Image (cartoon, rainbow, N blue to C red):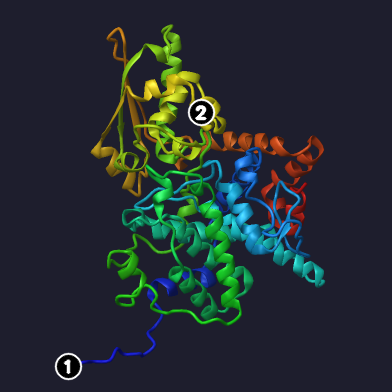
C-alpha cells in the first residue's frame, strides 16, 4: 500500500528560533564580555596585519575582478581595497585566520570565533559608509563589539556539546551560522527573515575537514573561515530580499541536516545563549600554533632554558614523552613528512621541536627555510605521545577548560629531567592578568609591520581607549587602518 508524504509546512526548528531570538532580543550587559571583545578586536586585526607579510596570503586578496572599486564599499584594513561586503568579508576573514594566531574555543568542537569579524566588520563598515552617504548617523564600533559577543556565543555554545569534526565536517560551519545570524541583525532583518537566513546557512554545502588532516593538510584551512564568513554575508543578503527559508532544515527526515550530515543525532546544549563564550575565550599570545599545542610549546620553552642551564642542547635529547589530552592526539599527533606550513602547525611534535632547538616558535618557523633543518625531523622521531585521561576530563570540564600538556625529556647520558606540565596557556581566562599586557604588545608589534610611525600613532591613540573606540564611527575607525 502506497502513502503520500505529507506536505504540511512544519514549524521552524527550535535551534533556529533560539538563535534568532538571542540575536534579536538578548541585551549584552556584561562588562567583562564587552571588555574582552575589545581586546579580541585589536588582537584579531593585529593577526591580519601580520598575515599581510606573507605572499601566500596576499595573493588571495582583492576584488574578484581586478581593479574593481565599490562606492561606499567596505575597506580591508591594512590594504587599499574597497570591496562589496561579501568579498570584503572573505578578505578580512582570510587575513584574520591565515597564521592560526587569533582566538580559540575548545569543546566537543573547536574553532576560532573571531573568524566572524570578517563578516561583521565588512558589513558594519559598508552600512556605515552607506548611512553617511545618505546623511544619516553611522554605525559605531560599540555595535561591532556587541556583534562579536553574539557571534562568539552562537559559535561557542553550539560547539560545547556537538562535535562536527567526528562526522568529518569542518568547524567553519559554525562560523557560517554565527556570522549569518549577527550580520542579519546588522542588516536589520525581521525575525522571519533572520530565521530564513539561518536556515540557509544550515542547508548550504558544508566544508569537509580533510584539508586539516593527514594526508591532505593544506592552506585551505587558512582561508576556509574567510570563505565561511563571506558566504554568511551573501546568505543574509539573499534573505533580505524576501527569499524563503527552510524551517525544518535540521530535523526533516532523510533530507535534513541531522540525518544527512550528523549521523541522525540532534544537537544538544549545555547552556543557553548569553555572554559565556566571549568571557572565557582563549587568546593565542605566545605562539602562532594550533591551540592544543600551546601549552606543549610553552613547556618546550621552559625545557630549552633548562637545557641551556645545564650546558646542553636539543642534540643531547634521547627521548621525549608527551603526556596530553585526547583531542591533541586526534588532531595534531603526526609522524612522517610535513609538506607545507599548514601541515607543520598541525603537528604537535614540530611545535615542540622548534622551541627546543631554537628557543622560539614564530609564524616564520613553519616556512621551508626553517622546516628543512634536519634537526627538527630528527627530534620529532624521538617523541612519543600518550593520552592522560585526567587531562581529557579537565579539557571538557566547564569549570576548568584546561588544555594541558606535559613533557618529560631523557638525555643521551641517561638523565631524566623533571617533567614540565603546563595546564593553562597564557591566553586562558585564568591567566588574563598575565596575558593582557602581552596581548597588547602583540597588537602594537603587528601594527608596526604594516603602518608608518605617524599612522601607527593615530591608530593607537584611537584604539587604546576602549570608551573612545566604542563611540567611533565604524567607517572612521577602518579608514585609519587602510593604506
Q: Which mark is residue 245?
A: none
User: In the image shown, does 36 or 392 lie closer to the viewer?
Assistant: 392
Q: Residue at x 28, y 66 (%)?
A: 265
Whole-percent x and y of residue 406? 33, 28
The nearer-to-camera label among 2 and 1 is 1
Q: Could you classify mark 1 by the number of other residues whose Cα lies within 10 Å: few (under 14), some (14-19), or many (20 or more)?
A: few
Whole-percent x and y of residue 274? 46, 61
Residue lying furthest left: 1
Above or below, 43 against 19 in this view is above
Above or below, 197 against 9 in this view is above
Whole-percent x and y of residue 17? 44, 75
Q: CA distance from mark 2 to mark 1?
A: 68 Å
Above or below, 19 against 325 in this view is below
Instruction: Check disc 2 and report its element: helix, strand or loop.
Output: loop
Q: Is 301 on the left-hand or right-hand side of 327?
A: right
On the question of residue 45 being in view, the answer is yes
User: In the image shown, does 469 or 383 lie closer to the viewer?
Assistant: 383
On the question of residue 137 being in view, the answer is no
Instruction: Check disc 1 and report its element: helix, strand or loop.
Output: loop
Nearer the N terminus, badge 2 or badge 1? 1
Q: Could you classify mark 2 by the number of other residues whose Cα lies within 10 Å: few (under 14), some (14-19), or many (20 or more)?
A: many
Q: Is 283 on the left-hand or right-hand side of 76?
A: left
Q: Residue at x 29, y 10 (%)?
A: 415
Quadrant location of the N terminus in the rendered image = bottom left
Residue under circle 1? 1
Whole-percent x and y of residue 260? 33, 68
Q: Which mark is residue 361?
A: 2
Among the 4 quarters of the image, the one containing residue 336: top left
Amino acid at each position: 500500500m502506497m502513502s503520500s508524504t505529507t506536505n504540511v509546512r512544519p514549524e521552524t526548528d527550535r535551534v533556529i528560533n533560539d538563535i534568532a531570538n538571542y540575536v534579536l532580543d538578548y541585551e549584552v550587559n556584561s562588562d567583562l564580555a564587552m571588555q574582552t571583545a575589545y581586546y579580541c578586536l585589536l588582537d584579531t586585526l593585529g593577526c591580519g596585519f601580520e598575515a599581510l607579510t606573507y605572499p601566500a596570503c596576499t595573493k588571495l586578496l582583492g576584488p574578484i575582478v581586478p581593479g574593481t572599486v565599490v562606492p561606499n564599499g567596505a575597506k580591508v584594513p591594512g590594504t587599499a581595497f574597497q570591496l562589496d561586503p561579501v568579498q570584503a568579508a572573505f578578505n578580512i576573514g582570510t587575513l584574520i585566520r591565515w597564521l592560526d594566531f587569533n582566538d580559540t574555543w575548545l569543546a566537543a568542537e573547536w574553532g576560532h570565533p573571531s573568524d566572524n569579524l570578517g563578516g561583521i566588520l565588512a558589513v558594519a563598515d559598508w552600512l556605515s559608509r552607506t548611512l553617511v552617504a545618505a546623511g544619516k548617523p553611522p554605525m559605531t564600533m560599540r555595535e561591532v563589539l556587541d556583534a562579536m559577543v553574539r557571534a562568539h556565543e552562537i559559535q561557542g555554545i553550539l560547539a560545547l556539546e556537538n562535535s562536527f569534526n567526528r562526522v568529518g565536517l569542518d568547524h567553519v560551519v559554525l562560523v557560517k551560522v554565527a556570522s549569518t545570524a549577527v550580520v542579519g541583525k546588522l542588516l536589520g532583518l525581521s525575525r522571519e527573515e533572520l530565521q530564513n537566513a539561518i536556515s540557509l546557512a544550515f542547508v548550504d554545502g558544508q566544508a569537509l575537514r580533510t584539508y586539516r588532516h593527514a594526508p591532505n593538510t593544506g592552506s585551505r584551512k587558512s582561508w576556509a573561515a574567510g570563505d565561511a564568513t563571506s558566504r554568511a554575508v551573501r546568505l543574509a543578503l539573499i534573505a533580505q530580499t524576501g527569499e524563503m527559508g527552510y524551517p525544518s532544515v535540521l530535523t526533516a527526515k532523510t533530507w535534513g541536516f541531522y540525518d544527512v550530515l550528523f549521523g541522525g543525532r540532534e544537537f544538544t546544549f549545555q547552556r543557553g545563549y548569553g555572554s559565556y563564550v566571549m568571557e572565557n575565550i582563549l587568546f593565542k599570545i605566545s605562539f602562532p600554533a594550533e591551540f592544543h599545542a600551546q601549552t606543549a610549546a610553552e613547556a618546550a620553552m621552559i625545557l630549552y632554558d633548562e637545557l641551556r642551564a645545564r650546558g646542553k642542547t636539543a642534540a643531547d635529547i634521547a627521548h621525549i614523552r608527551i603526556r596530553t589530552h585526547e583531542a591533541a592526539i586526534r588532531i595534531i599527533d603526526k609522524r612522517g613528512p610535513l609538506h607545507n606550513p599548514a601541515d607543520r602547525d598541525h603537528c604537535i611534535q614540530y611545535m615542540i621541536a622548534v622551541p627546543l632547538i631554537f628557543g622560539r616558535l614564530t609564524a616564520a618557523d613553519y616556512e621551508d627555510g626553517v622546516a628543512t633543518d634536519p634537526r627538527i625531523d630528527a627530534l620529532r622521531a624521538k617523541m612519543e605521545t600518550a593520552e592522560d585521561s585526567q587531562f581529557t576530563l579537565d579539557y571538557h570540564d566547564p569549570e576548568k577548560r584546561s588544555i594541558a600538556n606535559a613533557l618529560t625529556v631523557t638525555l643521551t647520558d641517561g638523565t631524566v629531567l623533571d617533567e614540565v606540565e603546563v595546564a593553562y596557556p597564557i591566553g586562558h581566562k585564568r591567566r588574563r592578568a598575565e596575558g593582557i599586557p602581552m596581548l597588547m604588545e602583540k597588537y602594537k608589534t603587528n601594527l608596526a609591520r604594516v603602518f608608518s610611525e605617524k599612522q601607527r600613532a593615530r591608530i593607537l591613540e584611537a584604539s587604546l581607549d576602549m570608551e573612545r573606540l566604542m563611540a567611533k564611527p565604524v567607517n572612521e575607525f577602518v579608514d585609519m587602518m587602510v593604506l
